[in-house]
Image (tube, rainbow, N blue to C red):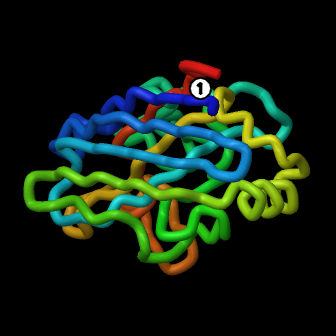
Amino acid sequence: MTKYKAEIVPLNAAKIGSNAHGTATFEVTADQLTIQIEMFDTPANTEHWEHFHGFPDGRPAAIATEANDVNQDGFVDLMETESTSGTTMVPFDDAPENMDIPHDRYPVADDQGYFAYTKQVPLKTLTTNFEQAFGSADLQLDKRVVYIHGVPANLNLPDTVAGMVGHFDAHVTLPIAVGKIEKVSD
């Protein structure tokens, strides 16, 4: 079994009024990927999209910081993370192996801003779909970053905050926390 971990730190905290933080762990066996994410101080009673992001060519992804706010509107939006972190790859939803990203089947924080997510994913299905999407079956977890997204719909966002995906607006896709995935054991 190979284990990976990400310490998830706040992003956009000053603007969204919460310091979302937590941990993500990934355990890979021959036939299964077990994902566990525990988050604290996220926007309460809000659905939180969560994914790993990376570069399809295998370059190491890094976490976005305030320096990624290229339009200087005070928010690091989804599009502004791409130069540092790459593209959205695998969702942490009800069926990560399907790699179906835009939907409403992600965790919802409780009234204290807490949520925990655990999923056992069939590795063969996931790597087959990953290869179809990105040209390689190797997840390269230690070259990826975890993003947690989502703020309440009533949070005032400037028009410059990009992130429309399907019929989901920037409130759904705004990053609130990020962590670099690192290998911790083989």
- Residue 95 in picture, x, y percent from top left: 56, 69
Q: Position of residue 72 (x, y in %)?
A: 43, 35
Q: Secondary structure at mark 1?
A: loop
- In the rendered image, the vertical position of residue 147 relative to residue 174, given as above or below: above
Which amino acid type corresponds to the residue marked 1 in the rendered image? Answer: Ala
User: At 61% across and 44% down in the image, what residue appears?
Assistant: 53
68 to 160, vertically: above or below: above
Residue 82 appears in which quarter of the rendering? top right
Q: Residue at x 42, y 46 (%)?
A: 36
Residue 181 image position (x, y, % from top left): 55, 29
16 displayed left or right of 117: left
**Residue at which label 1 appears:** 62
Residue extending farthest to the left is: 111
Expressed as whole percent of the image width and height from the top left, the position of residue 104 reads: 42, 76
In front here: 159 or 89?
89
> What residue sits 26% from the left and 69% below the top?
153
Viewport quadrant of the N terminus? top right
Most extreme residue toward the bottom is: 167
- Drawn side of residue 138 relative to residue 150, left or right: right
Residue 17 appears anywhere in the view = yes
Quarter occupied by residue 166 = bottom right
